Image (cartoon, rainbow, N blue to C red):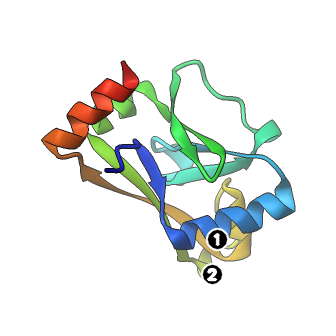
Amino acid sequence: MDTRRVVVTAEAQKVVDMLKKEHGDLVFNQSGGCCDGTAPMCYEKGDFYVPSRNVKLGEICGCEFFIDKDQFEYFRHSQIIIDVREEKAAFGNSFSIEIDHGYQFITRSRIFSDEEYKELQKLEA
């Protein structure tokens, strides 16, 4: 049973691996709106200051993944799934580093089953 709060699809993992080879250590932050909508944002680790309001949701591909604590409350019962799509038209139209390679990370989610949520609570205790 996979009760991690954040996971990544195989396609998104390929893009993360490509970005890590080019940029080194990365960090993700689930955007809460503003300029980039609600997309997961990927930065070089040294280029992103983690706001004190944010909580570490987990890791994907060895990269820390953060989310605003209010958003976390909204997603508390959900697993966040990071996926990717080709987005050639958005070149340079995002702060997230994958966009210049013609990709955009996207967030999908699913509600944990009661059994998964109980297991998750045990793991986090």
Q: Residue at x 14, y 40 (%)?
A: 114
**One can see residue 84 in this view:** no
Q: Is residue 72 above or below residue 24?
A: above
Residue behind mark 2 = 88
**Residue nearer the viewer, 34 or 60:** 60
> Under tag 1, what secondary structure?
helix
Picture mark count:
2
Say the numbered circle drawn on residue 14: 1
Observer able to see residue 5: yes
Residue in the picture at 23% in, 45% down: 112
Tell whether 18 sits left or right of 75: right
Position in image of residue 18 (x %, y %) = 75, 68
> Residue 70 is drawn in which quadrant?
top left
> In x, y percent, where is residue 3?
34, 44
Q: Position of residue 74 (x, y in %)?
A: 28, 35
- Residue at position x 55%, y 73% in the image: 11
Return the residue found at the far front. 1
Work out how far the residue at label 2 is from the one at label 1, CA to CA, in angstroms. 17 Å
The mark lying in front, picked from 2 and 1, is 1
- In-front residue for pair 107/12: 12
Quadrant where the C terminus sits is top left
Crowding near the residue tagged with mark 1, few <14, some 14–19, many ≥20 C-alpha atoms within 10 Å = some
Residue 84 versus residue 61 in the image, above or below: below
Q: Amino acid at mark 2?
A: Lys
* Residue type pointed to by label 1: Lys
Asked if residue 98 lies left or right of residue 117, the reply is right
Mark 2, secondary structure of its residue: helix
Other residues around mark 2 within 10 Å, as few (<14) / some (14–19) / many (≥20): few
| Circle number at residue 76 | none
